[in-house]
Amino acid sequence: MPLPTQESKAIFERSLQSMVEGGSSASRGPATFGDYPLYMARGEGSRLFDVDGNSYIDWMMAYGALPLGHAHPKIVAAVSEAVATGAHFATATPIEIEVAELIQQLVPNAERVRFANTGTEAAMATIRLARGYTGRPKFIKFEGHYHGWYDDFLVASNPQPPVSLGHRHDPIKIADSSGLNRNALDDTILVPWNDLSALERAIDTYRGQIAAIISEGIMANMGVIPPEPGFLQGLQEVARANNILFILDETVTGFRTAAGGCQEYYRLQPDLTTFGKALGAGLPVAAFVGRAEIMEALAWGGVLHYGTQNASRIGMYAARANLQTLLENKGAAFDHTWRIGHRLCEGLRDLFEELGTGAIVQNVGPMLQIMFTDRPAIRDYRDYCAHVDRAKYQQFVKALFRHGIYVTPSAVLHSVVSVAHTDEDVDLTLAAARNALVDLEGR
């Protein structure tokens, strides 16, 4: 039965007179959704409601920015208090110190904290900081990792035909966008992920020129691809041995994988770490943290990092309430999201096996993605480009929409469990997935 979306269609047609692709990001428009996107009106708990009155169990959760779910009462109260007493001052405020101290409680390497607005800004700042601190120009980025839309990062972040990627020993730098500075990628060294020998080879090639290695803790822009056992620890050791800074990008994984993120979960000691998404509980809050000796290079604008909206008062109130809530009852929120994530992933795996569907589920705790593939696992960007059927995934998601389940239609992204999700949500989702596969495959 078709999903009634006439109002979404009408809004999209109206939007074309004032906006590009009907919204403020290509990931929300026709490139991801097809003819037109679903326009959402409100959210509550684990549910989203669109402008046509359709209700969905939301497993996207604003790309992971809502660890407590939609409209959590404590976030609503915190934001309301901040608005009522002054939305933003662009001055030093006590609340930003409180949030910084909360982050220090959770994140082992957070000797100093600096706030920004988005993960892109935080990642940009860490690269500038690494270059300023070390006096070296280059940095290593891994294939398939996304660190935001800064020119120097925009390479090999989107799927490409496998024949265009080049040899693993010498990856071809395929820019992700037009309009980049002509020299933007000259100091970006591209390396396959989950491959320590490739990393060591790149360091040997550019010895003495590399300021930093930046890596996600879990590859989260090609579905969900976990690190191979020992890879991140080996990366850290190689960086230390060569006097190269290790930047851990936790924009996606921070305050989700564990209270202290991948740094805690994989027992890492990065020099610098970035946070975003889940930190602000839906508001634009990001941060980068790290060793005091490195972070102090920001002082007096030595390594410049400014921003009128940095540590916005509303965002800080939301972040404080968010972190405090996640830490209640000895971090029971993380136990809950891991348990619900396990139930959902195992249920989907059992369903695919029962129906003979050529699909797998890859996850780390509450982060998961379905991949239509004949492979038992996808371990890196090259595997993903060669073996994942993105078109079939999008068809499956559109079928899920009809059965009241909202996940991202983009196969390169992933789903997220929040505190608001319940066992009933899992049961309803598994039933919907069964019906969607029947719709898709005609069983």
Image (tube, grey):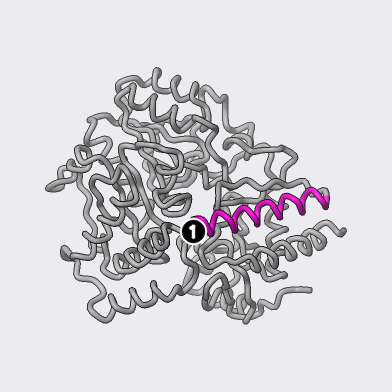
Percent of width and height locating residue 15: 52, 74
In this view, the residue in front, 380 or 184, is 380
Q: Is residue 282 magenta?
A: no
Q: Residue at x 35, y 34 (%)?
A: 246
In this view, the residue in front, 232 or 393, is 232
| Mark 1 residue crowding within 10 angstroms, few (<14) / some (14–19) / many (20+) | many
Q: Is residue 69 depicted above or below 133 in this figure?
A: below
Q: Is residue 375 left or right of residue 143?
A: right
Percent of width and height locating residue 202: 43, 23
Residue lying furthest front? 329
Q: Residue at x 34, y 60 (%)?
A: 285
- Amino acid type, label 1: Gly
Q: Quadrant of the N terminus?
A: bottom right
Residue lying furthest top? 204
Q: Is residue 299 left or right of residue 385?
A: left
Secondary structure mostly taken by the magenta-highlighted segment of the chain: helix
In magenta, the rendered stretch is 334-355
Q: Is residue 68 depicted above or below 109 in this figure?
A: below
Q: Is residue 32 left or right of residue 237?
A: right
- Local secondary structure at mark 1: helix
Q: Is residue 10 depicted above or below 260 in this figure?
A: below
Q: Is residue 330 left or right of residue 163?
A: left
Q: Residue at x 50, y 63 (%)?
A: 62
Q: Quadrant of the C terminus?
A: bottom right
Q: Which residue is mark 1?
A: 64
Q: Residue at x 16, y 65 (%)?
A: 91
Q: Is residue 352 magenta?
A: yes
Residue lying furthest left? 300
Percent of width and height locating residue 440: 79, 59
Q: How many marks?
A: 1
Percent of width and height locating residue 94: 18, 65
